[in-house]
Image (tube, rainbow, N blue to C red):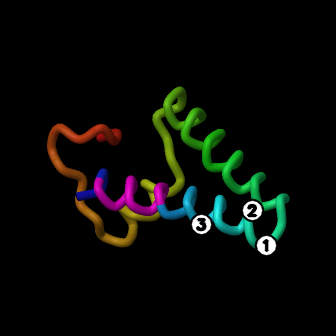
Amino acid sequence: MLNTYFRIIVGFMVLLSVVLTTYVNPNWMWFTVFIGVNLIQSAFTKWCLLETILVKLGVKKEEGSCSIK
């Protein structure tokens, strides 16, 4: 379940940043850059702030997920 929530939230944030970049201000592209850098960083460190927040909110990790155990 954690993996599903993670993908939905990150996908929504990327789409939101593209819409904000297009219709509000081009500087919103930095939000997209931040998301991408955070994803790359989590691949190397095996730590992600969003995952930590979701676990503290009570979202359960499923067996065999892509997320860390």
Magenta residues span 4-11
Image coords of residue 26 (percent x, y): 83, 59
Tell me the element at label 2: helix
Amino acid type of the residue that numbered disc 1 sits on in the rendered structure: Val
Which picture quadrant has residue 58?
Answer: bottom left
The residue sitting at 83% across, 67% down in the picture is 25
On-image quarter of the N terminus: bottom left
Between 45 and 30, the residue placed more toward the observer is 30
Tell me the element at label 3: helix
Q: Earlier in the sequence, mark 1 or mark 3?
A: 3
Q: Is residue 12 left or right of residue 1?
A: right
Q: Residue furthest left?
A: 63
Q: Is residue 11 left or right of residue 30?
A: left
Residue at image mark 3: 16
Alpha carbons under labels 1 and 2: distance apart: 6 Å
> Quick one: label 1, few (<14), some, or many (20+) residues within 10 Å?
few
Q: Is residue 7 left or right of residue 12?
A: left
Q: Residue furthest top?
A: 44
> Quick one: label 3, few (<14), some, or many (20+) residues within 10 Å?
some
Image coords of residue 19 (percent x, y): 65, 66
Amino acid type of the residue that numbered disc 3 sits on in the rendered structure: Leu
Alpha carbons under labels 1 and 3: distance apart: 11 Å
Residue at image mark 2: 21
The residue sitting at 46% across, 34% down in the picture is 46
Tell me the element at label 1: loop
Q: Are marks 1 and 2 in contact (CB under 8 Å)?
A: yes
Amino acid type of the residue that numbered disc 2 sits on in the rendered structure: Thr
Residue at image mark 1: 24
